[in-house]
Image (cartoon, helix red, strand yellow):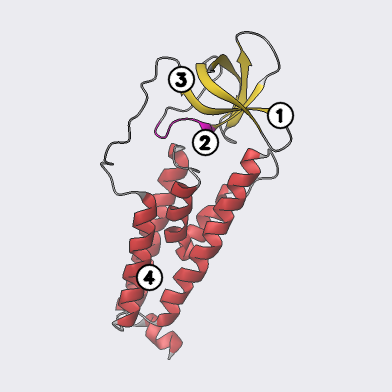
Amino acid sequence: MRQVGRIQDWNDDKGFGFAVPHGGGPKVFVHISAFQFGSNRPKNGDLISYDLSTDDRGRPRATNTRFAGQRIETKSAPTRLPRKALGLIAMAIIGSLAALHKIPWLVAGTYALVSGLSYLAYALDKSSAEHSSRRTPESTLHFLDLIGGWPGALIAQQQFRHKTVKTSFQTTFWLTVIINIALVGWLVSSGTIERFVA
């Protein structure tokens, strides 16, 4: 049965807060990932409906959360290429460029390694957010993206539904992607990398 409550103590930076049930009872933990993809950011006082669940410690937790009056999204064909697909396509292109000797294998290997680290960093941060434990600083995530981890970050962002709604984070993220591509492109075209690995 759906429950109704109001958002209270919302921490937008950390992406969680609580719902005060209309029928009384203990406050219910609400995480940003519980909201329908593409929803607005919650704020204190928002009326929501949710399914009541519990976390691994038996504490009440909201799932399948929607704002009051929000239309239920149907599974229609996506209008944009999913982030996960973008990340996989990027890695395939990087691997193909290395196979065609357009970029050194060192560059492709670095992208693969740092993307793996970036994926793990996002996974750990998502887990920390859900358990209210110590978070991975956003600066660390952005640094990994900047040095080549952005394909792994794209995959993680969609898989874990993490950091996809926060506008300031996404603006900085895409800026790091552009800077990384531009810098690596210049290093390859100028022959700087070839001289370094020769």
Of pointers 4 and 2, the one earlier in the residue sequence = 2
Q: What stretch is highlighted in magenta?
A: 32-38
Q: In the image, which is nearer the foreground, mark 1 or mark 3?
A: 1
Q: In which quarter of the image is residue 88?
A: bottom left
Of pointers 1 and 3, the one earlier in the residue sequence = 1
Residue found at x 54% / y 53%? 141
Q: How many labels does the image show?
A: 4
Label 1 SS = loop
Residue nearer the viewer, 58 or 79: 58
User: Label 4, on which residue?
Assistant: 184
Of pointers 1 and 2, the one earlier in the residue sequence = 2
Q: Is residue 156 above or below residue 39?
A: below
Mark 3 packing: few (<14 Cα in 10 Å), some, or many (20+)? Answer: many
Label 2 SS = helix
Residue nearer the viewer, 175 or 41: 41
**Marks 3 and 4, how far apart in space?**
43 Å
Q: Quadrant of residue 14?
A: top right
